[in-house]
Image (cartoon, rainbow, N blue to C red):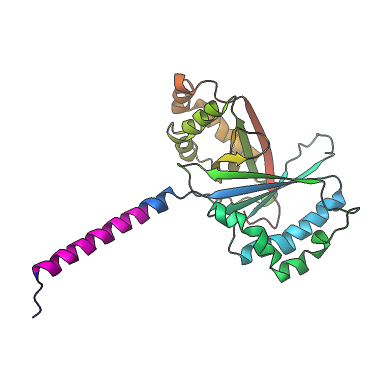
Amino acid sequence: MKFFTKSSITALRISCTTLIIALSLSSIAFAAQRDFYQFKVYHLKTKDQEARLDIFLEKAYLPALHRLGINNVGVFKPIIAPNAPAPTDFLVYVFIPFKSSNEFFKLDKKLLADKQFALDGKDYLDAPYNNVPYTRIESILLSAFTEAPIFNLPNLNSPKSERVYELRSYEGPTEKLYLNKVDMFNRGGEVTLFKRLGFNAVFYAEVISGGQMPNLMYMTTFENKASRDEHWKAFSADEYWKKLVAMPEYQHNVSKNDTRFLYPTDYSDM
């Protein structure tokens, strides 16, 4: 039988305590981790550009991201109302979820080292100056809300062509009032309300770099337009929402609501 001395027992207790503290800190760090997102918005002028971009995204860009372990990439296009005039500026939205900002900053360097990506994307990557595949690219960088730190894949069963992805941007009159709206989503319970009502959100996030700051963005998803309208009707009638929106501390925190209705392409991951 092996006996422990008083000093060895003390050392064991210290080691166990240290391990518990380390595990606790690790758990806290994991809990505090938030996703980092990029929205790339391609502006196009012609159907030819749209076709070339689709080929590049489907055959080269998304497969390259998948090889790097970046999955669940969303590719979306605007829903055009039946009687609306034909658009003169085509838009394609690419949503890329990252586990951290560091993963985002290393992406371009990793893509440059991917020989398969260079081969698959040659038409797009080596396009001449007088035959470009897009007009310009917007890049919006976002950090997930504390109450929604990880994005969710939407749980939808309808054909992709019928789905409605609602992308909203809420701009604040000032930085302080914008942060007040973020607080309304987090501490105020707006995120929880959307979840309770089944809005099937992909993400909620603070914009840390973009063209409409200060602003937050979030994306909710629906089987079709009828489902979308039913959900928002329930939201407007909800008693908690009526109470929340009337609170004095959450007044005048949105100066502009920019809403975009999108549908996923056939090759989109979501």
- Which residue is nearer to you in this view: 258 or 211? 211
- In percent of width and height, residue 132 lies at 86, 53
Residue 22 lies in quadrant: bottom left
In the displayed structure image, the side of residue 188 where residue 221 appears, left or right: right
**Main SS of the magenta segment?**
helix
Q: What range of the chain is rendered magenta?
A: 6-27
Quarter that holds the N terminus: bottom left
Residue at point 72%, 70% (across, down): 116
- In percent of width and height, residue 64 lies at 67, 64
Q: Is residue 247 visible to us here?
A: no
Residue 169 lies in quadrant: top right
Residue 84 lies in quadrant: top right
- In percent of width and height, residue 44 lies at 81, 46
- Name the outermost residue toward the right: 130
Residue at point 50%, 28% (across, down): 180
- In percent of width and height, residue 166 lies at 63, 39
Q: Is residue 193 above or below residue 52?
A: above
Answer whether residue 24 is magenta in the image: yes
- Name the outermost residue toward the bottom: 1
- Which residue is nearer to you in this view: 51 or 227? 51
- Number of marks drawn: 0
Q: Is residue 89 visible to us here?
A: yes
Residue at point 37%, 51% (across, down): 28
- Which residue is nearer to you in this view: 86 or 54? 54
Answer whether residue 157 is magenta in the image: no
- Name the outermost residue toward the front: 7
Q: Is residue 150 above or below residue 247?
A: below
Q: Is residue 245 above or below residue 227?
A: above
